[in-house]
Image (cartoon, rainbow, N blue to C red):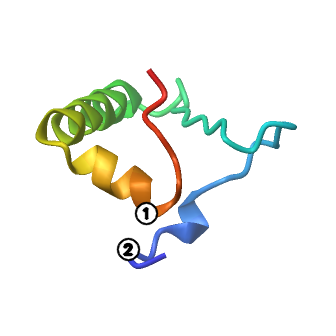
Amino acid sequence: EKLGVLDQLANAGSTKNQNNIYISFSPKIEKSKEYAKILTEGIRKLKESGELDKILEKYGLKYWK
């Protein structure tokens, strides 16, 4: 919301387990692989720095792997 990109997101449905979150990238978009790599590297860096645990803790969540 703060980034002003809500209109660029689409809800693809829901599951019974509300803790599962999936992010997908369209194969029709040329930069999808690049975006997926950026996301993966960003999560890895957050995990290594301990920042991911701090963020998840705010929401009562734990790392999923």
Looking at the rendered structure, the kind of residue marked 2 is Leu
Q: Is residue 41 left or right of residue 55?
A: left
Of all residues, the one furthest to the right in this rendering is 16
Q: How far across and down, in percent of the image, does residue 38 sit?
A: 25, 35
Q: What number is the disc on residue 25? A: none
Helix, strand or loop at label 2? It is loop
> Quarter of the image containing the C terminus?
top left
Q: What number is the disc on residue 3? A: 2
| Camera-side residue of 10 and 43 | 43
Q: How dense is the environment of label 2, judged by Cα within 10 Å: few (below 14), some, or many (20 and up)?
A: few
Helix, strand or loop at label 1? It is helix
Q: Which residue is mark 1?
A: 58
Q: Is residue 19 left or right of residue 60?
A: right
Vertical arrangement, residue 15 with respect to residue 33, above or below: below
Vertical arrangement, residue 59 with respect to residue 18, above or below: below
Q: Residue at x 61, y 39 (%)?
A: 21
Q: How far across and down, in percent of the image, does residue 52 sit?
A: 29, 46
Looking at the rendered structure, the kind of residue marked 1 is Lys
The residues tagged by marks 1 and 2 sit, at their Cα atoms, a distance apart of 20 Å
Q: How far across and down, in percent of the image, does residue 30 sit?
A: 39, 30
Q: How dense is the environment of label 1, judged by Cα within 10 Å: few (below 14), some, or many (20 and up)?
A: few
Q: Residue at x 37, y 74 (%)?
A: 3
Picture quadrant of residue 35? top left
| Camera-side residue of 47 and 27 | 47
Q: How far across and down, in percent of the image, does residue 15 sit?
A: 83, 37
Q: Is residue 19 left or right of residue 42?
A: right
Counting residues from the start of the chain, the first of labels 1 and 2 encountered is 2
Picture quadrant of residue 44? top left
